[in-house]
Amino acid sequence: MPNPYRGLPSVDALLQHERLATLTARLPSDRLTQHVRDVLDQARARIRSSNGEGTASDVPIDADALAAALATEVVASVERTSRPSLVAAINATGVIIHTNLGRAPLSEAARAAMETVSREYSNLEFDLAAGGRGSRLDHLQELLKALTGVEAGIAVNNNASALLLSLSALAQGREVIISRGQAVEIGGGFRIPDVMLQSGAKLVEVGTTNRTRASDYTNAVTDNTAAILRVHSSNFRIVGFTEEPSLRELRTVADEHGVLLLDDLGSGCLLDTTRYGLVPEPTPQESVAAGVDLMMFSGDKLLGGPQAGIAAGRADLVDVLKRHPLARALRCDKATIAALAATLTHYFVGEAESTVPVWRMISAAPEEIRDQAQALLDGIGRGRVAESESMVGGGSLPGESLPTFVLALQAEDLPEGLTPARLAERLRTGSPPVVARVSDDAVLFDPRTIASGSMGAVVAQVLASLAD
């Protein structure tokens, strides 16, 4: 009986297969050879698995068919490797700041700014007036000062980095007091206490999960205390029998004992959320007014910009952060700085509500969303427009929702054999991917989070997925 391994083509023979001709012309030979070797290794593994260490088989081997199949595998392997895994997706879930879908989409001006500074050289660290070395940290200073009232600020790659840098520079080897109810876990399993410990600061928890008073902080201060830290519970809410001191009360405690007051705001909200029927979200402006020494907040949540973390407050403290070795390790690149500056400019000129996508979605009128849901229904030709709720998401305004209208495709609206879960899967794996919400045996499409230019693509993808 023939040995199954002998039916496998050699590396050289497979490289010469006609199905690989196009790849041979455009791919470096060593790279293509490695893909061929990998495919042949996988084929040997399949033989071992099916025949037990390569024992003989009674089935005759068609060498030409096997070589053609393996060549097809090589082509597929190369395509998988070269195809970008990070692609644009259409968010039809109604979750505005969707962490898994990249959080905040950027404004047109922010995208243009990134492209402009990436196309050619830039003055990232060059002082054009003086003709010498400049600092990348200077490009955001005036905007941060004008918008929040701080003396200075620094941008790093996310808010956890801003907290890590601040504690490393200002409290390493010393105590930082935090309410037990604020020692939270943020996205991806990252915990505030763990971040604090990595900074070299000693965490001192006070109070209880639901109640902490100013006196708890006072009683915890020692000669080794560097700071009091307030952490906003941006991704959860404790209700019922609760109590926590205001920033002004904490400012009084900090002044009495000569320690710093730090504030981790989380989402970086510069607008009044109550104008949109949402609960109040703390703002950097309020922290400055309360006398916070240094605050930290995100750039890609309610601020609506690129992934970034901002530490801002007293100029002398920000100078300490700038000189710390971690500042270089955590710094933003030119594209991020350009996008962040463009986003902050929207707030400076008073146009954020209409130009920053996050705020455009939050402020969208219900009747506008209903009309868009009806347009989806008209294009798809099945389903119904229904009332629902959009979530702010992204670790911002926990539990808060906005009334919305959705297109709902229920099980009875789908072709026989196609379930809502299967339809959602087809949409996710399409091009472009459309991520919808499955609830109560229906696929829901919330126009609030669908860009106006993507409505046609949603209709086309749904129709294609229904026809498969």
Image: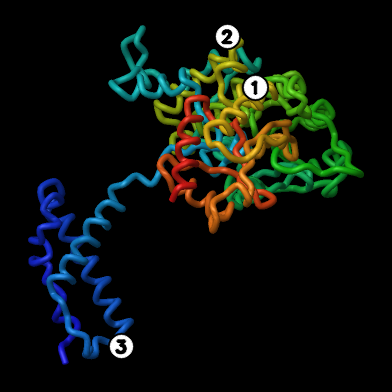
If you read the primary sequence from the N terminus, does the residue marked by circle 2 or circle 3 appear first?
A: 3
**Residue at 72% from the left image edge and 31% from the top image edge:** 402
Q: Are marks 3 and 1 in contact (CB under 8 Å)?
A: no
Look at label 1 and name its amino acid: Glu
Give the percent coordinates (x, y) of residue 255.
Answer: 79, 27
Q: Nearer the viewer, residue 463 or 433?
A: 463
Mark 2 against mark 1, which lies toward the viewer?
1
**Residue at 17% from the left image edge and 84% from the top image edge:** 60
Quadrant containing the N terminus in the rendered view: bottom left
**Residue topped by disc 1:** 368
Q: Nearer the viewer, residue 170 or 361?
A: 361
Give the percent coordinates (x, y) of residue 78.
Answer: 24, 54
| Callout 1: SS | helix
**Residue topped by disc 3:** 52
| Callout 2: SS | loop
Look at label 2 and name its amino acid: Val
Q: Crowding at label 1, few (<14), some or many (≥20) Cα neighbours within 10 Å? A: some
Q: Crowding at label 3, few (<14), some or many (≥20) Cα neighbours within 10 Å? A: few
Give the percent coordinates (x, y) of residue 321.
Answer: 54, 30
| Callout 3: SS | loop
**Residue at 13% from the left image edge and 49% from the top image edge:** 22
Scheme of colours in the image: rainbow
**Residue topped by disc 2:** 349
Q: Nearer the viewer, residue 327 or 364?
A: 364
